[in-house]
Image: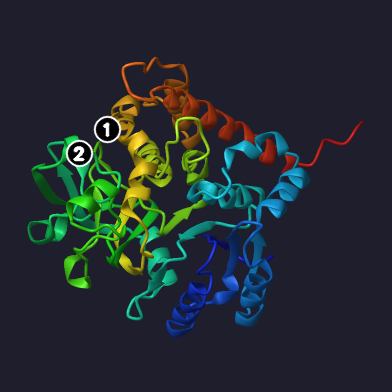
Amino acid sequence: MSQDICVVVPTIREYDCMRAYFDNARQHDFDLSRLHVVLVTEDFCETDAMREMLDEEGVSGEVFDGTRRQEWYDEQGISEYSHLVPAASHAETSFGLLYMWANPQFEYGFFIDDDTLPHDEDDFFGQHLRNLAFDGEIESVSSDENWVNVLYQNHDDHGLYPRGYPYSAMHESVETETTHVDSVVASQGLWTNVPDLDAVRILMDGDLQGQAQTRTTREDFTNDFVAADGDYLTVCSMNLAFEREVIPAFYQLPMDDNQWDVGRFDDIWSGVFLKRACDVLGKQIYNGFPLCEHNKAPRSTFDDLHNEVAGLELNEHVWELIDGVGSDSDSYAGVFEAMGQRLADGDFEEYQNGAFFNHVGEYMLDWLDCLDQLESARVPAAADD
């Protein structure tokens, strides 16, 4: 392969959205030969049609349904770690991270959700890569709650808080200043149309179809920004680019297929952990443009609530548990291991479903072991004397 960008798309229905992203690349003279697209899907989906779509577009890529993922695990010698990627869950984006790690030619990763579209005026791939290479002055945002609402710019008008933002951190006092940034490792693009809210907030907005009545437009986003050192933020994986180096600290946490029925926090918690690692290592997460249009399909808000409610209390506390952890580490893996140990070994009986934290911690440590095994498989064995 000559491609240096791996585009990971979890999809079960709207894979054709990728045609719009390829058209956007052509419109802005972005070299599509740099892309290798990994469509992560299920056995019951239209895998042949997905492959045909990539062929018709002339874009390199592969389709991994459940059967093909298991074959890939076997080929890589990591079948014992297949539990890390839950089936039929948004968290299966972690498979794309494993695929990237096994193929070192990929310097950059992109996560794109199949219910999004690029804005014609934004150079989607090019802008994300420019964000990752950014070196200069940018707005830094902080609050007295140590959380940054990524929708802060027009909050007085729309009053929105994104999915995963702690309820205890609402009504924060926001401060902004200018700072110099030169080590960006992730670029989070935000979203117009349907905001990325949790079910409780969607219900509060009077919507029973899982979407929210309040919508966002380009006018709600005025400039790019970073969250200040020591402040956390929600990281949504629907429109995201990242450097290869963050993969050890960017595991999309195991959701949905667990005995506690915790779901919907895979990218949120991975963002919390990544921000902690970035703060320790002096790196930054860039937020703002390019925007995408989020066209979330109607579905019962109560279904989303059912998937979220088991983890709502845990989400209030996960960032507190890992804040300050791993401060003496000098690598993403080192910080992630420290956070994983904190959760794996902790006593969380005071929380409803607190044992899920232990489960997550154990999976985080398994994630690092899996990456080590993939990496060791790439190193040729020493010749016998």
Callout 2–callout 1 Cβ contact below 8 Å? yes
Q: Residue at x 48, y 43 (%)?
A: 252
Mark 1 Cα within 10 Å, few/some/many (few <14, many 20+)? some
- The three-letter amino acid code for the residue at tag 1 is Glu
Pick whichever, 348 or 361, lies toward us. Answer: 348
Q: Residue at x 29, y 61 (%)?
A: 211
Task: Classify mark 2: helix, strand or loop.
Answer: helix
Pick whichever, 108 or 340, lies toward us. Answer: 340
Q: Residue at x 67, y 40 (%)?
A: 375
- The residues tagged by marks 2 and 1 sit, at their Cα atoms, a distance apart of 7 Å
Q: Quadrant of residue 166?
A: top left
Can residue 85 be seen here? The reply is yes
Residue to which mark 1 is pinned: 316
List x then y, in percent, for residue 34.
Answer: 57, 70
| Location of the C terminus (image quadrant) | top right
Direction from residue 232 to residue 338 in the image, left or right = right
Q: Is residue 23 above or below residue 143?
A: below
Can residue 161 be seen here? The reply is no
Residue 167 circle label? 2
Task: Classify mark 1: helix, strand or loop.
Answer: helix
Pick whichever, 63 or 27, lies toward us. Answer: 63
List x then y, in percent, for residue 167.
Answer: 20, 38
